[in-house]
Amino acid sequence: MDSVGVAAAAPDAGPGPAWQSKCPWGAPNTTSISCSLADVMSEQLAKELQLEEENAAFPEVVAAAEGPFITGENIDTSSDLMLAQMLQMEFDREYDAQLRREEKKINGDSKVSISFENYRKVHPYDSDSSEDEVDWQDTRHDPYRADKPTTTPRRGFIGKGKDITTKHDEVVCGRKNTARMENFAPEFQVGDGIGMDLKLSNQVFNALKQHAYSEERRSARLHEKKEHSTAEKAVDPKTRLLLYKMVNSGMLETITGCISTGKESVVFHAYGGKSATEDKVIPPECAIKVFKTTLNEFKNRDKYIKDDYRFKDRFSKLNPRKIIRMWAEKEMHNLTRMQNAGIPCPQVVILKKHVLVMSFIGQDQVPAPKLKDVTLSNEDMKKAYYQVLDMMQQLYRECNLVHADLSEYNMLWHDGKVWLIDVSQSVEPTHPHGLEFLFRDCRNVSQFFQKGGVAEALNERELFNAVSGLNITADNEVDFQAEIEALEKMNEDHVQNHGKKLSTFSSDGDPPIYDE
Ligand code: ADP
Ligand code: MN
């Protein structure tokens, strides 16, 4: 990505000799993979500068008010960088598929096989993926993958090795698409590609077409000076590309817009698409939580993750970007635990870097209201209280978790019950501050329901004991807190001395049971 940015900004990145090569998308003759994205960028540099000027003069008109955020066709193609990346992504995919086909053809049944692995294009965008994350791309059927025997007709290809060109459908189709580009409005700059043997896949063609059409309407709209969409501004191009890929892969149908922009995350609504694997069903509506990639926002949350033994070893070795991914990962793991315990909460769909896709709590794009925003009948309020009490116990006992940010802000009212969300900061009770977090949760919950008129609501100390099974007897907050801290310290000392953590705290106020 950075290299792309550099390529775009390089002052000498004007149309150079690269354009004299036959194919503008690269497929160079040398084995060194020179990314043809630079070519794309240089071609578009002029337009980029022009757009920049335009954008400075007129705020970007954004789709949010007029339609969905990302549908796969309407992706914000006004960013040339993005467009170039999309094209590159398409190209790389097709190129690699072609390589695979060729490899297969050459190897046939031969006992000795050769590999073109080194000739594959690893897109710079993907090169920073870490091995420890789920790659949703792998779960999708790739229509270009040669899983059914491809019978290339006799003389159906020309050239050798990397420069091979087959008469495959996508090629023919790609040329057609390129030709159809001429139908775009005359002022729409399609570049020099038409003179060459440029092949555009349907998806890219559609994106370009959409872009051409919206460009036509654009001039009419520019003077309207609409507000910047939070959705557009909330995520960086890298994230937008990631979201685009999710739509492009068919996993998501449409990303309709932004539901919430918080300090640490942005949440989008999306309609689910089709899953490549039959065992996995994508919910009809999804929430996409994008963890913000500026570490500043997360600094004060260090303590949640640094001391979580599940992540401790990794924490010190990670760079800031990876730490943020860990928040998403943590939320995923915690949600899964909750799901397994039957606690109403979003169901994890997929995790990709710092983006977590889960089921949407709500309906028809309308998110379920937070408990703080909903007016419940006395009866429902009481029902909600007992449910929350139950869930806190389940969370502690069955999931071995403390929510650590539990309040009326992170509980949604949907389908006549309370749903827990926002668990990226949740920790295990043996976390060095786990019990303090639990106490804080209890305070929030008690206060909310007591104010809400639930006479039966336990006070924070009673609630704490009811959830944890501990029996702290202090009758005032200061002493209570002191006892909590003493317990935490005992646990820490034990960890120090024995290199072990406690499995859980015992249920009757005795010293905690050590897990030997
Ligand atoms: P933050 O850390 O920004 O508080 P949250 O996980 O609480 O992140 O999400 C912010 C808001 O987005 C929530 O208050 C809720 O309104 C909405 N939201 C988050 N996840 C979902 C979901 N799965 N379904 C519906 N709405 C959601
Ligand atoms: Mn929240």
Image: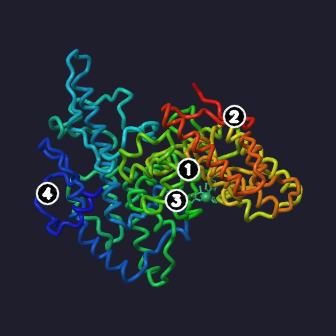
Marks 2 and 1, how far apart at CA: 26 Å
Category of crowding for the residue at label 2, using alpha-carbon neighbours closer than 10 angstroms: few (below 14), some (14–19), many (at least 20): some
The amino acid type of the residue labelled 3 equals: Ser
The image quadrant where one finds the N terminus is bottom left
Q: How far from the left and from the top, in percent, is residue 414?
A: 74, 53
What residue does disc 1 label?
A: 424
The amino acid type of the residue labelled 1 equals: Ser
Q: Is residue 6 above or below residue 434?
A: below
The amino acid type of the residue labelled 2 equals: Ser
Marks 1 and 4, how far apart at CA: 47 Å
Residue placed most toward the observer, 213 or 485: 485
The kind of secondary structure element at disc 3 is: strand
Residue 282 shows in the view = no
- Asked whether the residues under the numbered discs 3 and 1 touch, taking CB atoms below 8 Å apart as contact, a structural biologist would say yes
What residue does disc 2 label?
A: 506
- Which label's residue is closer to the chain start, 1 or 4? 4
Q: How far from the left and from the top, in percent, is residue 287?
A: 58, 53
What residue does disc 4 label?
A: 18
Which quadrant of the view contains residue 222?
Answer: bottom left
Residue placed most toward the observer, 407 or 133: 407
What residue does disc 3 label?
A: 265
Q: Is residue 126 above or below residue 71?
A: above
The kind of secondary structure element at disc 4 is: helix
Q: How far from the left and from the top, in percent, is residue 443?
A: 72, 57
- Which label's residue is closer to the chain start, 3 or 1? 3
- Asked whether the residues under the numbered discs 4 and 2 touch, taking CB atoms below 8 Å apart as contact, a structural biologist would say no
